Each structure stands twice: as C-alpha cells, then as structure tokens.
Amino acid sequence: MKILDVTEYRDWLIELKARIRKAQTHAFAAVNSELVLLYWQIGKDILARQERQGWGAKVVDQLSVDLRQEFPDMKGFSSRNLKYMRAFASVYRDPEFVQRVSAQMSWSHNCALLDKVSVHETREWYANAAIAHGWSLAILLHQIETKAHERQGVAVTNFHKTLPERQSELAQQLTKDPYVLDFLTLKNDARERDLENALITHLQSFLLELGRGFAFVGRQYRLVVGGQEFYLDLLFYNAKLHCYVIIDLKMDDFKPEYVGKMQFYLAVVDEQLKSSRDEPSIGLILCKTKNGVIAEYALRDSCKPMGVSEYRVLPPEVAEVLPTIKQLEAELVDENQKNEHDSIS
C-alpha cells in the first residue's frame, strides 16, 4: 500500500474545499433567485386579482393566514411581507429586469430599495450598482443615504482631453464628488498627515468609497528624481482602468498650483512605474473645498489626466451623537427579523 503523500493530499483537500464552497455559493444564489422570482409572481397575482376582482386590502391579511397554515416552516408569508411583494410587482413590471437584476439580490436588498428610493430610475441604478459591486445590505443603505447616484462621475476632470474616449468615459464614471468619508472624524486643527493616517486606518472603508477595482499600493510612496526624494500621499492601482492612480490630499481649498505638482508626479510615475501594458496614470486631488470654475481653468491646459474633488468627514461634535457602525448593523438585523426579511433572504 502506497504511503500517503501529505503535500499532495493537502493540495487536493484545499482544491476540494474551494469547489465545495463555490457549489454552496451557487446553490444559495439559485435558491435566492427562485425565491425573489416567486415573491414577484405572488405580488403580481395579488395586484391582478385586486384590480380584476376589486378585492380590498383585507384579502392580503386572509392570504397570509392561509399560506402560513399551509406552509408553517416558511417565514415569508406575513401580511407585511405580502404587501412588500405587491409593491415589488407594482414597481417592477418588466420580468426580464426582475430576473436579470432584482433576483440577483437578496429579498432584504429589494425591500430596502422599495423603502428608501422613490424614483424608479434611481432604484434601478442602485440595484445595478449593488450587483456590480457586491454591496451588502448595510453598504447599500449607506450608499443610498449618501446619495451615491448624485455623486458618481461628476468630479471636475480633463479626462476627455487627455485619455482615449473609451478610457476617459470609464475613468470619469469611477470618480465622485464629493467623496463621503463619514467613517472619519477630524479635529479642526487636523493636518494633511492626520487625514492620511485616518484613511489608512480605515483603508477598507476608503476603498469601498473609491469604488470597484482599486488596489492599495502604498502611502508616502517614495520617488527619486534628479537625486531628490518626493513622496506621494497615496498610490493605488485600478484593475478596471489598468493604470496607477495618485491621490493628493489637501486640507484646504483647491489652488491652481496643485495641478502643476500633480502633473510632475504623474510624469514620474509613468516613467518609473508604468509598464507597456498599463494605461496612462491618473491623478486625483482631494480637497476640503473647491471652486469648480477655478478647477476647470486649472485643468484645461494640463497634458496629464487628473481630476479634482471635495471630500466630507464627520465633525467630532456630530460623531459623538451618532450611533456606531455596530449599533447600526444591530438595528438592521433587528428590523430584518421583525419584518421576516432576514430569514427569507
């Protein structure tokens, strides 16, 4: 009998575990998709029968009693949840969109969109974004609260002049203005290094706010030019844009001279770090405030792609009275359990 090769067995076990987890994920996704489609169909039936038969709201209460009696192990047939199904079918009339988008999210995600977003086009924007970025329920609610759809792609940039059309459109859509850094609190006398330290401490939250595809390369990244040292505040690489992204942090209002400094940084990074497979590096100047007209003039004749955005942080006095992230998550869980969303998603 051949002696077991420990290394070979370990590698095989790792591969099996990965395959099992992948199968579990696919199975969960399939079950969730079928459940959301079922709820849409139930909601559609309720709407149709109420419109055709003239049934009032009490039919939903009766239906809840009958379905719970027939399916005691299923937790999704409360009167409240049946009303969500009716509202869900009412706002999503296109079955193709329901299958392609809505059914790829949990029922809790769909209910949150019904509760928090009243404009149909905006609701669809958040639904598509939640799937593209893999947002959890808490993150989805945060993005809605901070009006992500209004901030996306509106930074002052010169991308249309300095990048090819397809690259410039993608780069523009990856910008925001302002960047909401409400996971940070800074004192009134805070300096740029304090902001940098806080962003590194909360790097995961900052990456989430930056958007999809950003990978952190380093802070105070050292460049040597002509025997002198220069340091980049933050350096990232974006996998969707296939380029380096330099972020320069400012604690004051935007000034035109910041563009010249960023242009120098971009030239050096393109020379020293960029490979033949990379696209031109991009710069992003994050300022406490900016005058949009001045920023547009400052970028107009720059030959390097860059943008200017503001950022928002929580003042200390506001942070003291706000609930913590753990408290908010606990409230979300309690609310989901109350509405029977958690057990059906």
Image: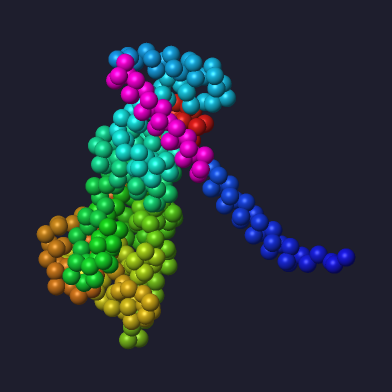
Q: Residue 167 occupies which quadrant of the picture?
A: bottom left
Q: Nearer the viewer, residue 71 or 310?
A: 71
Q: Nearer the viewer, residue 208 or 255?
A: 208
The image shows a total of numbered marks equal to 0
Say whether residue 144 is left or right of residue 8.
left
**Image coords of residue 46 (percent x, y):** 37, 23
The residue sitting at the bottom extreme is 226
Residue at x 32%, y 86% (from the top left corner): 226
Q: Up-down: is 206 above or below 218? A: above
Q: Nearer the viewer, residue 312 or 129?
A: 129
Residue at x 69%, y 61% (from the top left corner): 12
Q: Which residues are magenta?
A: 29-53
Residue at x 54%, y 47% (from the top left corner): 25
Quadrant in which the N terminus is drawn: bottom right
Q: Residue 138 occupies which quadrant of the picture?
A: top left
Q: Is residue 196 magenta?
A: no
Residue at x 85%, y 67% (from the top left corner): 2
**Image coords of residue 264 (percent x, y):** 26, 76
Q: Magenta region's main secondary structure?
A: helix
Q: Is residue 47 magenta?
A: yes
**Image coords of residue 123 (percent x, y):** 30, 40
Q: Up-down: is 120 above or below 157? A: above
**Image coords of residue 316 (percent x, y):** 34, 43
- Colour scheme of the rendered structure: rainbow
- The answer to whether residue 211 of the structure is visible from this angle is yes
- The answer to whether residue 327 of the structure is visible from this angle is no
